[in-house]
Image (cartoon, helix red, strand yellow):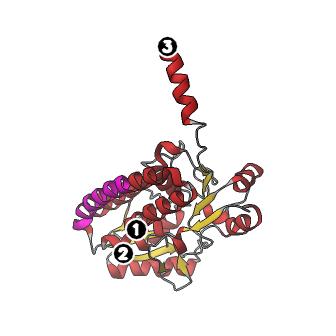
């Protein structure tokens, strides 16, 4: 009797609604979208874990995911120019949401003035805005689950606000201390937490630094009395040795702005882990 009743209720409920086909570009965005989607479904991430978004090239399986997508959440063409072309060619029905431009956050220019800095996920206030945008867009694509997306976004925002307060307090003792960053990718993080980036070894275009540039950075490190220099995951740390030679610079732990050191598939908690790790590298080196 109980089995018959269950079957009857299932029949009345009708077929389960399919989750929207959601695609993201890389791990930080994947983490944010996963938090909003919750149990409704799992987005498909295009870049492999540790992949370089600047040099993204579409594979056949990734092209198939774009063709089936209902919505694509990505940073924007400033970070993955190849994806911009791919969405135009393959994402026929997909709603494209470049978060730099449609995420309701804010942007900044590179320190050298060469265009918009795309590393906006490193400011948690942008992530807060994006969580809301993701929920609204998913609610429009999938109205039956709009309340679920909205509730998930509110819960994720509360956790992020709490984390931000913790990191702000942890970084307070190192504010103003001159730092040397490997890549011009930390402007958002530094601006938000009041950190002093005296110089970056690689400019925004990630071009290999010349001997002259390394000499200039070394001089900047000496004149500013920089306390720490940081290698970056996936990049040759040899340049740091050139800059640090003959100075009092301490070499910090590798920083990981794009979650390149993640060995498993991204989780909803990856974004919080990314911010926590970045803050810890600064505190461990400059706080001693």
In the picture of the structure, the residue carrying the numbered disc 3 is: 1
Pointer 1 or 2: first along the chain: 1
Name the residue nearer the viewer: 5 or 108.
5
Secondary structure of the residue carrying tag 2 is helix
Query: Residue visible at 53% across and 72% down?
Result: 102
Q: Residue at x 47, y 55 (%)?
A: 32
245 or 192, nearer to the observer: 192
Q: Which structural element holds mark 3?
A: loop
Q: Are marks 1 and 2 in contact (CB under 8 Å)?
A: yes
Which numbered marker is on residue 166?
none
Label 3 packing within 10 angstroms: few (<14), some (14-19), many (20+): few
Q: Is residue 187 left or right of residue 211?
A: left
Which residue position holds label 2? Answer: 191
| Nearer to us in this view, 221 or 49 | 49
Counting from the top left corner in percent of width and height, residue 35 is at 45, 50
Counting residues from the N terminus, which is met first, the one under dot 3 or under dot 2?
3
Q: Secondary structure at mark 1?
A: loop
Please provide the residue range marked out in magenta.
154-173
Does the magenta segment cover residue 68? no
Point out residue 39 in the picture as x, y percentages from the top left corner.
48, 42
Residue 123's label in the rendered image is 1
Give residue 215's position: percent from left, percent from top: 49, 79
Q: Residue 52, how many percent across, how many down?
A: 61, 59
Question: Of circles 3 and 2, which is in front?
Answer: 3
Q: Is residue 213 visible?
A: yes
In three-dimensional space, the C-alpha distance between marks 3 and 1, rounded to whole angstroms, equals 57 Å
Reply above or below: 96 against 10: below
**Mark 3 and mark 2: span between their CA atoms?**
65 Å
Mark toward the start of the polypeptide (3 vs 1)? 3
> Which label lies toward us, 1 or 2?
1
Q: Residue at x 43, y 54 (%)?
A: 271
Cα–Cα span, label 1 and label 2: 8 Å
């Amino acid at each position: 009797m109980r089995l018959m009743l269950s079957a009857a209720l299932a029949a009345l409920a009708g077929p389960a609604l399919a989750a929207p086909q959601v695609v993201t570009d890389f791990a930080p965005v994947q983490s944010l979208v996963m938090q909003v989607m919750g149990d409704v479904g799992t987005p498909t991430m295009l870049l492999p874990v540790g992949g370089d978004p600047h040099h993204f090239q579409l594979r056949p399986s990734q092209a198939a995911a774009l063709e089936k997508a209902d919505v694509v959440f990505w940073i924007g063409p400033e970070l993955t120019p190849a994806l911009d072309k791919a969405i135009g060619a393959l994402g026929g029905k997909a709603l494209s949401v470049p978060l730099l431009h449609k995420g309701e956050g804010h942007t900044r220019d590179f320190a050298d003035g060469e265009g918009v800095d795309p590393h906006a996920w490193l400011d948690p206030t942008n992530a807060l805005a994006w969580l809301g945008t993701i929920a609204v867009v998913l609610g429009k694509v999938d109205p039956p689950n709009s309340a679920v997306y909205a509730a998930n976004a509110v819960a994720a925002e509360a956790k992020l606000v709490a984390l931000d307060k913790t990191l702000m307090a942890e970084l307070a003792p190192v504010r103003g201390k001159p730092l040397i960053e490997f890549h011009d990718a930390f402007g958002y993080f530094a601006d938000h937490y009041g950190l002093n980036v005296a110089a970056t070894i690689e400019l925004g275009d990630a071009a290999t630094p010349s001997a002259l540039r390394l000499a200039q950075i070394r001089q900047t490190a000496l004149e500013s009395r920089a306390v720490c220099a940081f290698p970056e995951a996936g990049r040759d740390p040899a340049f740091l040795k050139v800059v640090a030679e003959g100075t009092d610079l301490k070499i910090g732990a590798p920083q990981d702005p794009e979650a390149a050191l993640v060995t498993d598939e991204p989780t909803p908690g990856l974004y919080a882990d990314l911010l926590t790790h970045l803050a810890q590298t600064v505190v461990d080196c400059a706080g001693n």
